Structure formats: C-alpha cells, structure tokens
Amino acid sequence: MVVYVDLATNPQARVIVAVLWVMTTLAGVFLSLRLYSKISRRRRLWWDDYLIIVAWVMLLVSCSTSTANSRLGFGLHFDELPVENLTRLGIHSTISGFASVIAVACSKTSFGLTLLRLTDGWIKWYIIGLLVLLNVTHYSSSVFFWVSCNPPAKTWDMTIPGECWPISVTVNTSMFFGSCSALCDFSLALLPWRFLLKYNMYNREKIGVAIAMSMGVFAGISSVVKMTTIPGVLNAGDFSYNALPLVVWGFSESALTIMAASIPMMRHLFISFRRDNNIPTTATTTTTTMTIGTARRATLGTSRLAATDSGHDGDIDVYTKSGTTERRNWSQQQASQLKPPSVDKS
C-alpha cells in the first residue's frame, strides 16, 4: 500500500506540479484557439491538427503521472522515499517519460507537415529528412524507457533481479537524441524565413508571419538547456532529488512546441480581432495608394499563406500549379475591386 507525502514537506514537488500544470494549461489554450480558428471558418482538420491533439493528450498524461509521483514523494532524497512507493514511482516515471517523448515527436512532426504544404524542391526534401530523423530518434527513445533493463520489469521495479544499461550508455544516447531534437527545432523554426522571402506579400505581413512561424526556436532553446542537465542528473545519482531541472525543461520543450505550432494557425483570429476593432492593417492603409498590379501580387502571396491552415485539398490548389487558372481568375476579381472610381469630367 502506497504512502502519500504532503506537498507542504516537499518543496521541489510543489515546483514540479506548478510548472507542469501551467505549461499544460497554456499549451491547451493555444491548441484550443488553433482549432477554433479552423472550425469557426468551417475548415477541415488535417493530419497536422490531429497530431498536435495527440501531442497535447500525451502532455496531459505526462503531467498527470508526474503529479501523482509528487504525491508519492518524488523530489525528496532517495533515502527519504517511503519504500512502499518505489515500484509505483518507477511505473509513473516510465509512463511520464514515454508520454513526454511522444508529445515532442508528435508536436514537431505536426509543424513539419504544415511546412511541407508550403515548400517544394530541396527545402521540402530537407524537411522530410528532418522528420524522418526526428521520428526515428524519438520513437527509439520512447522504447528505451521500457527495454533498458533485462528483464524489462526491472526498469520500474528495482527489487527484481537483473541488469540495466550502464549510466554512460543512457547519458550518451540521451545527448544524441537531444541533439537531433534541437537540430530539428532550429531548422523548422528558421526555414520559414528562407521560403517566405520569395512570397509576394506586404513586408510587414511577411515579417510578422515569419516571426510567428519561428516561435519553435524557444523549444530548441529548452531542448539545449535540457541537454545540459542530463549528465549531471544521471551521473549524480539520487534521481528523485536531482531530476527537477530535467523534468521541467523536458516538459517545457513539448509544451512550447505545441504553442509554437499553434500560433501561425491563429492568424485569422488576429485579423478578425483587428477588423472588429477597426484597427487598420497594412492592406487597408495602403490600398488607396498602390497600383492594381501591386495589389494583385500582394493578394496572391497572402492567399498562399492562408491556405496553410485550411486543411482542405481544394484550398491548397489555390497556390499549386494545378490551380493556375483558378488563381488567375481569382486575382483578376480581386484586382478589379481595387480600380479607382471613375471621375465625371463633365
């Protein structure tokens, strides 16, 4: 029978619970706004949406099991932990780590799929390569949580006779997987600047969209910080007491990725807010002075970016080669609306 530990006597557990639930709630808010932005405009959800939903569910599972561990004494020195709780702590820790890694893989893959719909040529193949590397390393890491000992049950129950991998192996593999994760974060965050520059959009809007799509750099920073904590935590022993920074930064990585992947999809909410509050946008303030040709090019660039959160093949055709005729007719209609009013010379 387990013995529950009062959080008042476990300050590290209080920090873990507070940070994890705040991050989970924020990620849930950003995800909800992303989904509302699509559903309110009657857009169909696509694979990137389903993946990021799975990522948040896995984040919630990790948060819940970590919270349960805090009630069992996680955060105290090993010799202060109730013996009755050790097996339960091991099971919860394994589930929490597994779910956290899956959350990272799904959230980053979601954003990568979004970028694939905007790119072509070598950039598209580079993103595909990143996604393959990301998923192979992260899903391998998730499996290692269950098979790092022989028999596997010893992973969460130290009373079972058997052997586990040396700490050096765990440290080296964790550092390698963390490096791959950071590489994918920074690459996916910076690539939008490469291909958005060629879009015919207003500069202010182009920069704003690029910044919104580059929020994943914060997930990359959290991944790097997490990597710096791995050797010290694993080599020091007393994992329960020393794991606070590793747990917090590892959890923040997946939560920040969910938030970063949701921000670009909330673009229409910002536009609607500005329109409803009569806040002038770049398009509305410059329409009266630009030529019809300039308006046409700017509108085309905006339409291609808007299609990224449609989740519907028909909308994607607006900016693909197969939609050339539709795009030309649509742009002519838009340009005709910007013709200056006729002046009666009589």
Image: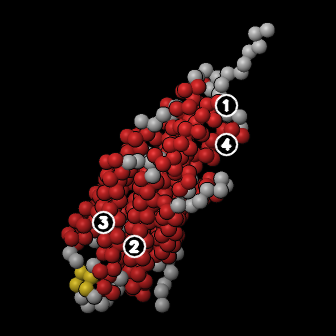
Residue under circle 3? 137
Residue 156's image quarter?
bottom left
- Which residue shows up at 52% across the image and 65% down it? 50
The secondary element bearing badge 3 is classed as helix
Residue corresponding to mark 1: 337
Residue 48 shows in this picture? yes
Place of residue 105 in the rendered image (x, y in percent of width and height, measured from the top left): 40, 64
**Which residue is drawn at the image coordinates 62% and 26% (left, top)?**
287
| Identity, as a three-letter code, of the amino acid under mark 3 | Thr
- Label 2 to label 1: alpha-carbon separation: 55 Å
Cα distance between the residues tagged 1 and 3: 52 Å
> What is the C-alpha distance between the residues marked 4 and 1?
23 Å
The mark lying in front, picked from 2 and 4, is: 4
Task: Please state the horizontal and vertical placement of residue 34, each as a whole percent of the image.
Answer: 58, 55
As measured in the structure, the alpha-carbon distance from the residue carrying label 2 to the one carrying label 4 is 39 Å
Name the amino acid type tagged 1.
Gln
Residue receiving disc 4: 273
Question: Element type at marker 4?
Answer: helix
Q: Name the residue under label 2.
A: 98
Discs 2/1, front: 1
Sequence-wise, which precedes: disc 1 or disc 3? 3
SS for dot 1: loop
Against 95, residue 127 (above or below) is: above
